[in-house]
Amino acid sequence: MTARPVSGVHLTGWGAYAPSLVLTNADLEKMVDTSDEWIVSRTGIRERHIAGPNETTASMAAVAGLRAIATAGLQPDDIDLILVGTLTPDYPMPSTAALVKGAIGNKRAAAMDLAAACSGFVFGYATAHAYVASGMAKHVLVIGAETLSRCTDFTDRGTCILFGDGAGAAVLSASDEPGGTLGIEMTTEPSGAYFIWLPAGGASRPTGEASIAAGEHYMKMKGTETFKMAVRTLGSTATKSLAKAGIGLADLDLVIPHQANLRIIEGLAKSLDFPMEKVFVNVGSYGNTSAASVPLALSEAVAAGRVKKGDRLLLVAFGAGLTSGAITLEWTADPAAAARAAGIGPADVSVMPGYLEPVNPFPPALEWVRAGAASPTTTP
Ligand SMILES: CC(C)(COP(=O)(O)OP(=O)(O)OC[C@H]1O[C@@H](n2cnc3c(N)ncnc32)[C@H](O)[C@@H]1OP(=O)(O)O)[C@@H](O)C(=O)NCCC(=O)NCCS
């Protein structure tokens, strides 16, 4: 890595991956006391993707990462640094980023994970920006990837309706061209640290029989408190990022917010007096995929023709911590470059031999539920 500061940091590549297994609201109606009507009216979510038995955060991240590298017109070895934002790493160690490096065949990058929950991609973008701007890296691969289905309590209707699995990625590159990143804002508010948390599995409460019996290996959430803080924080983070960029809301062409809940997104737009027509929403098809949500939405927005050269975008997220981050940027890439990633899929990712043994009990459990079982833990 060199250390010559550069004037511009541009998003040159983007890509995403979602597993093929889809969990619908109708499936959830068979698992917990809920209804499609309740879920859609309170969250806007209709379905979410669930990792298959041979998929993990690293394997999904690697596919999204390869797609972003191809879109940027680069080879895996052009990447100097790999950052993976995730709250569901394959293991506490090694990092998921290290596994991704191996899976995409990169021989030279430094690789590390970043723990900022649903703000993981935006915080990763900010970190990548700093590396590129300082000259320490020329091309950084930033990934947000999650396998939330493996820490979701599918007997808790307050959380299981919300979350899904997937991955999204971007490449940030040095360039002296105008545009690229314009303004970055990041905040962390620990007074809300236990609004969304996963109690067991860390140094404070290592997983054991007692923690498993208490269900502490599953995500816990104070939904209403999180909701209110989310709307407030998203608005202030977005506004500060725009101020740092030196532009106003009226200058924005598209806002790509964290896809947690349609009502939170609408609340954000209302609080900013910003038109929903300029806000990209895909929460209905994916649910909340945490760190994967913003880059997944970004890739879909580009594919849907919602982004063109010269557009000003705002990426804004919030998550456990409570973290929040916003990036204002001027888009300089050719949206059609995504075609370079056509055909790249799971078969192009080389995982360690024997690594991806089927580990996920959920797909058979889902099949049981569809076959009439009372819950994912009982057979029909
Ligand atoms: C979780 C969330 C959808 C709940 O919506 P809400 O409008 O706040 O609903 P409440 O929690 O007030 O619950 C209202 C009622 O619906 C019930 N309810 C909760 N989940 C339900 C479900 N899946 N189906 C049917 N009823 C449900 C509650 O038990 C409550 O019933 P009660 O009035 O008899 O006690 C909402 O709070 C939310 O989205 N919060 C933010 C979550 C989030 O984004 N987390 C991730 C941050 S990155």
Image (cartoon, grey):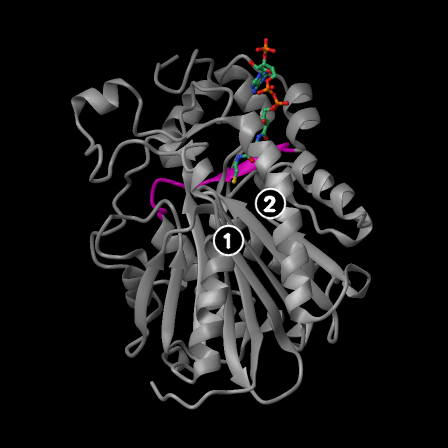
Residue at the spot 49% in from the left edge and 44% down from the top edge: 319
Q: Please name the predominant secondary structure of the magenta segment in the image.
A: loop
Answer above or below: position of 71 versus 305: below
Which of these two is toward me, 291 or 135? 135
Q: Image check: 331 left or right of 157? A: right
The quadrant of the picture showing ligand 1 is: top right
Quadrant hosting residue 232: top right
Residue at the spot 42% in from the left edge and 15% down from the top edge: 375
Q: Amino acid at mark 1?
A: Thr
Quadrant hosting residue 66: bottom left
Looking at the rendered structure, the secondary structure element under dot 2 is helix
Magenta segment = 45-56
Residue 334 drawn at (x, y percent): 67, 76
Looking at the rendered structure, the secondary structure element under dot 1 is strand
Residue 162 drawn at (x, y percent): 54, 32
The residue tagged 2 is 233
User: Is residue 297 among what the camera can see?
Assistant: no
Q: Disc 2 to disc 1, how far (Cα)?
A: 9 Å
Q: Say whether marks 2 and 1 touch (CB < 8 Å).
A: yes
Q: Amino acid at mark 2?
A: Thr
Residue 15 drawn at (x, y percent): 54, 63
Q: Which numbered disc flags the more N-terminal residue, 2 or 1?
A: 1
Quadrant of the rendering where the N terminus is positioned: bottom left
The residue tagged 1 is 187
Name the residue furthest front. Answer: 191
Looking at the rendered structure, the number of numbered marks drawn on it comes to: 2
Residue 116 drawn at (x, y percent): 42, 50
Residue at the spot 39% in from the left edge and 64% down from the top edge: 83
Q: Image check: 18 left or right of 285? A: left
Which of these two is toward me, 10 or 338? 10
In the rendered image, residue 149 lying in the magenta stretch gets the answer no
